[in-house]
Image: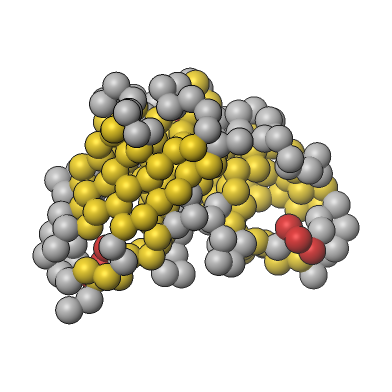
């Protein structure tokens, strides 16, 4: 199917580790990319490929992928990490882009 | 550093045509796919479509009958037209540079967003 499923919300205590997951059949053949969106701002690209951070993204962000599941992990979450996070991938045959529904991260 | 700046009409009546343009400043225009993505108020991201500098385009199947993306390589600009808009098309519309290098891809950077409201 051409859908990506994310949990609606997750919370983490300041300084702790949190994992945000994304599931979908497309992830078996196409890596996810991840985007952070804070209120009133455009999405910011934070992860791509197997575990690649764009320039300027802190190394507390990491990525992984196994089977039909991709994960974005924040190790030592900071208050500024509170945001909505979206995964994206492509259908391997049509190359149409798919977005997950987003996960709201709250840092306690 | 690549920057995307977008503009277009922000208030439309039902049945009118949405028209947005995105200008690309800095970096290559030919190595990437140029995308339009929208976000209804309080909701998630929805891909509209993309175009390569060659003119080859792909569209979200749900919008394919109404969306048209074009590119002007002489100006490093690309545009979106969405016909027969309705209230459900009210959203923040973003342009974004896309990289496609199978089996990976990403969108970076994004434009600032344009709020388009459809109301009678």
Q: Nearer the viewer, residue B83 or A66?
A: B83
**Left or right placement of residue A76 versus residue A52 in this view:** right
**Quarter of image, res A49:** top right
Q: Residue A48: x and y, percent?
A: 61, 33
Left or right: A45 in relation to B101? right
Vertical placement of residue B71 versus B88, above or below: above
Q: Quadrant of the C terminus of chain A?
A: bottom right
Left or right: A37 as drawn, with respect to A14: left
Spot occupied by residue A80 in the image (x, y as percentages of width and height): 76, 61
Residue at the spot 34% in from the left edge and 34% down from the top edge: B75
At a point 71% along the width and 35% down the height, the residue shown is A55
Residue B12 horizontal side relative to residue B108, left or right: left
* Residue at the image point whose x is 55% and y is 52% from the top: A43
The way the protein has been coloured in the rendering is secondary structure
The x and y percentages for residue B6 are 40, 51
Instruction: Count the labels in the image.
Output: 0
Residue B68 appears in which quarter of the rendering? top left
Q: Can you see residue B56?
A: yes
Q: Is residue B55 above or below residue B84?
A: above
- From this view, report whether residue A72 is shown above or below residue B16: above
Q: Quadrant of the N terminus of chain A?
A: top left
| Percent of width and height locating residue B24 | 44, 38
Quarter of the rendering containing residue B115: bottom left
Q: Residue, x 22% and y 57% (percent of image)?
A: B18
Q: Residue furthest front?
A: B74
Q: Name the residue furthest bottom.
A: B120
Q: Nearer the viewer, residue A108 or B117?
A: B117
Q: Is residue B50 visible?
A: no
């Amino acid at each position: 199917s051409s859908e990506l499923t994310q949990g609606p919300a997750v919370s983490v205590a300041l300084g702790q580790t949190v994992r945000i997951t994304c599931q979908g059949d497309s992830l078996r053949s196409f890596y996810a990319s991840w985007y952070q969106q804070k209120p009133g701002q455009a999405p910011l690209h934070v992860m791509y490929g197997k575990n690649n951070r764009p320039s300027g993204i802190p190394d507390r962000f990491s990525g992984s992928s196994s089977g039909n599941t991709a994960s974005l992990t924040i190790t030592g979450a900071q208050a500024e990490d509170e945001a909505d996070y979206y995964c994206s991938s492509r259908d391997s045959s049509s190359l149409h882009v798919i977005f997950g529904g987003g996960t709201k991260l709250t840092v306690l | 550093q690549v920057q995307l700046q977008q503009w277009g009409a922000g208030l439309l009546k039902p049945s009118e045509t949405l028209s947005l343009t995105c200008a690309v400043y800095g970096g290559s225009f030919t190595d990437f796919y140029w995308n339009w993505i929208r976000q209804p108020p309080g909701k998630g991201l929805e891909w509209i479509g993309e175009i390569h500098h060659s003119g080859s385009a792909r569209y979200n199947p749900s919008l394919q009958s109404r969306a048209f993306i074009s590119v002007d390589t002489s100006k490093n600009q690309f545009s979106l037209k969405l016909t027969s808009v309705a209230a459900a098309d009210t959203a923040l519309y973003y342009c974004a540079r896309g990289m496609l290098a199978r089996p990976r891809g990403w969108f970076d950077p994004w434009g600032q967003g344009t709020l388009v409201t459809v109301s009678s």
